[in-house]
Image (spheres, coloured by chain):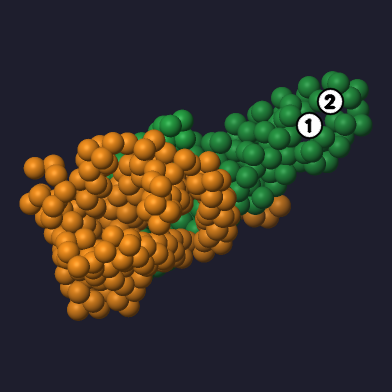
Amino acid sequence: MTLAIFLVVFAVITLFVILRVSVSRSLRLRSANPQRIEPIDVEAFRNLVNPAENEYLHRQLPSAEFRRVQRERLRAAAAYVRVAGRNATVLVAIGQAALTAGDEKTAEAARQLVDSALLLRRNTTFALLRINLAIAWPALGSSAAPVLSGYERLNGSAMLLGRLQNPAVPVRISSAS
Amino acid sequence: MLQAHSFLWNYLWVAPNLLVFFLGILLWKRGFNRILPSFVAFAILTALGDLAAFAADIIPSVSAQNFWLVFWAELLLETLLKFLVIGEILSHVFDPYPSIARLGKMLVSGFGAVLVLLAGVIAGFARGDSVVHIVATAHLLEQTVFIVESGLIIFLFLFAAHFRLSWDRISFGILLGLGISSCEHLATWAMVANSSPSEHVRRLFDFVNMATYHVAVLVWFYYLLVPGKAPKKSTIRLPETNLAVWNREVERLLHQ
């Protein structure tokens, strides 16, 4: 009977999730709002995930102090990665909406943007996992470099799409330095 | 009314299968067999299989043993086709996005293997609801199939939701129908296979199963035959932010 209850609960939760996804599918366009993009200070992020910086701190600080500092740095990096991931999902929505644009150039730019944004979303997911592991064991390192390179590629795609859609109006996902 | 072989019973067994059979034929005629070969095969062949099981149930000369053999054959065919349909939808959802297609397919394969293992273990712990081996194992197979099926469907929905992937109307409709049907069937078959309910409760479960399948068939009709709204041209305007700063930042990054 316990097994039956477990399976019934699983089935009910699954059905609930499916219906919820179905409802949110019709509200998808709400997320395609460029205003929801939060600019990120790429330089600060780059500094936080710089292996040379980690190595320097490791050499200069006592082990206990290094672990404490490293955990703080990793938490800050995780916050940046989360924002990058959220920005990527907004850009996926914007790109998918722009796929319906009439001209071929804009549609192609939108396809590139969606692909780059998905790659970034994937990388942020993995990077967050690695960062959380590294918070538990600071010696592992954060391995967030793919996120940075993905973000740079995404910048290029978003800018290209922005220029094609409206040459006078840009979209910005990195903050000014 | 809620008795075996009542009008409602016969309707709920026959009508959804006739509807899904005609849906399959209609889709075939409209050339959907090139886009959705597995779903078209599923619609036509499972309908025929289920109708054969219905015929075996009502024809007095068919023995109980032979009825269960027909039921088993239909169950195996339906299982195979359903997993082919899920694979087909998987390709439709992921293939347009090369950056996550490989990851998605790899995760689905891994998760599917875990689900099969888990469903096997759960079946091993199940008590079985009948002393007749062919009946008890058929119910256990139903439970096993629906665990794997609903697990794969929820994984697909969550993966697509995580990446905010847009679904095409047809893939979404097919998976929604399969999802609703598999979740409800999993719940009822789990109760049947593990808690030995009374004959009356089991009959009620049969009605619920058939009614849910009917709903799933109507969902497929709606999503596959009723045309969706024509996509509007993108009206999203990019925000009025500082182009100069944005360009400077990108160029600085590119030149590093």
- Between B98 and B22, the one nearer to me in the picture: B22
- Chain that is coloured green in the picture: A
**Contact check, label 1 and label 2, Cβ < 8 Å:** yes
Q: Chain of mark 2?
A: A
Residue that label 1 marks? A138
Place residue B24 in its image quadrant.
bottom left
| As drawn, B89 above or below B204 | below
Residue B20 visible (yes or no): no
Residue that label 2 marks? A66
Is residue A170 shown left or right of residue A71? left
Q: Chain B hue?
A: orange
Distance between mark 1 and mark 2 Cα atoms: 9 Å
Between marks 1 and 2 in the image, the one whose residue lies nearer the viewer: 1
- Between B130 and B86, the one nearer to me in the picture: B130
Residue type at mark 1: give it: Pro
Residue type at mark 2: give it: Phe
| Crowding near the residue tagged with mark 2, few <14, some 14–19, many ≥20 C-alpha atoms within 10 Å | some
| As drawn, A17 above or below B237 | above
